[in-house]
Amino acid sequence: MTDGPDNLVLQFLRRLDDKLDRVSGDVHDLKIRMTGIEEAVAGIHRRLDRLDGRVERIERRLDLVEH
């Protein structure tokens, strides 16, 4: 009779362990994806900064802004 509750607890712990493994894998995948997104956003910011510099230079050459 004492084997029953122990087996139920062990079954529960095994299921919990399996779920935790899946969650851990999902978090790892999300970290990889977020890193890719962060790198893409950083690239966009670099491009926008370069474009901003080019626009400022064009505005100066066309005397569209005060010196």
Image (tube, helix red, strand yellow):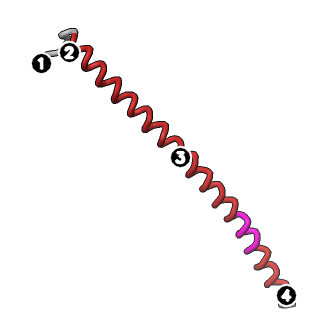
Would you name the residue on which mark 4 appears? 3
Q: State the residue at coordinates (62%, 51%).
A: 29
Real-space Cα separation, disc 4 to disc 1, in angstroms: 87 Å
Real-space Cα separation, disc 2 to disc 1, in angstroms: 8 Å
Residue 67, numbered circle: 1
Q: Amino acid at mark 3?
A: Met
Q: Nearer the viewer, residue 64 or 1?
A: 64
Marks 4, 1: nearer the viewer? 1
Real-space Cα separation, disc 2 to disc 3, in angstroms: 39 Å
Decide: is 36 above or below 54.
below
Q: Amino acid at mark 4?
A: Asp
Q: Quadrant of the N terminus?
A: bottom right
Q: Nearer the viewer, residue 58 or 26?
A: 58
Q: State the residue at coordinates (69%, 59%).
A: 22
Real-space Cα separation, disc 4 to disc 2, in angstroms: 84 Å
N-term mark: 4 or 3: 4
N-term mark: 4 or 2: 4
Picture quadrant of residue 54: top left
Real-space Cα separation, disc 4 to disc 3, in angstroms: 46 Å
Residue 8, numbered circle: none
Decide: is 53 above or below 14.
above
